[in-house]
């Protein structure tokens, strides 16, 4: 089994961003990063259940709500219920 990135195939029909946008016109990224508002990144059960998609969604909710001063902090149990819904 081969692992890693598949070799890219050149296709002349592929759209190129440089054909539509001048790189010089792009705005400079902000100096202050919004991630500074999030102090801790909990595991959100990813170390026990390999539910990285649900944990990532939980981290996004945590970060976005903290950055907007309305912190919503999900627990490991919330993530497990979201990724493995069952009748408990």
Image: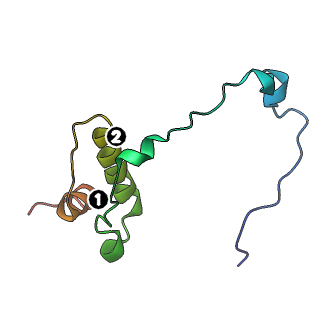
How far across and down, in percent of the image, does residue 79 sit?
Answer: 25, 59
Quadrant position of residue 64: top left
Say which residue label 2 marks: 64
Residue at position x 86%, y 51% from top?
9
Q: Is the N terminus in the top left, top right, bottom left or bottom right quadrant?
A: bottom right
The relative height of residue 40 versus residue 50 in the rendered view (above or below) is above
In the drawing, does residue 11 fall left or right of residue 6? right
Instruction: Return the mark for residue 18.
Output: none
Q: Nearer the viewer, mark 1 or mark 2?
A: 2
Q: Nearer the viewer, residue 16 or 30?
A: 30
Say which residue label 1 marks: 83
How far across and down, in percent of the image, does residue 37 sit?
Answer: 36, 45
The answer to which of marks 1 and 2 sits earlier in the sequence is 2
In the drawing, does residue 22 fall left or right of residue 42? right
The relative height of residue 14 versus residue 79 in the rendered view (above or below) is above
Q: Secondary structure at mark 2?
A: helix
Q: Nearer the viewer, residue 25 or 8?
A: 25
Count neighbours of disc 2 (C-alpha within 10 A) and say few if under 14, some if 14 to 19, many if 20 or more: some
Residue at position x 35%, y 59% from top?
55
How far across and down, in percent of the image, does residue 73 sit?
Answer: 21, 51
Residue at position x 40%, y 63% from top?
52
Q: Nearer the viewer, residue 13 or 65?
A: 65
Count neighbours of disc 1 (C-alpha within 10 A) and say few if under 14, some if 14 to 19, many if 20 or more: some
In the drawing, does residue 79 fall left or right of residue 14? left
Residue at position x 29%, y 64% from top?
44
Q: Is the C terminus in the top left, top right, bottom left or bottom right quadrant?
A: bottom left
Outermost residue to the left: 88
Quadrant position of residue 83: bottom left
């Amino acid at each position: 089994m081969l692992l890693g990135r598949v070799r890219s195939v050149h296709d002349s029909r592929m759209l190129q961003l440089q054909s539509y946008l001048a790189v010089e016109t792009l705005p400079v990224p902000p100096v202050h990063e919004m991630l500074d508002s999030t102090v801790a990144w909990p595991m959100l059960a990813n170390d026990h259940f390999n539910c990285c998609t649900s944990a990532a969604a939980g981290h996004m909710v945590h970060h976005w709500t903290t950055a907007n001063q309305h912190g919503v902090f999900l627990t490991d149990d919330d993530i497990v219920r979201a990724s493995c819904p069952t009748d408990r």
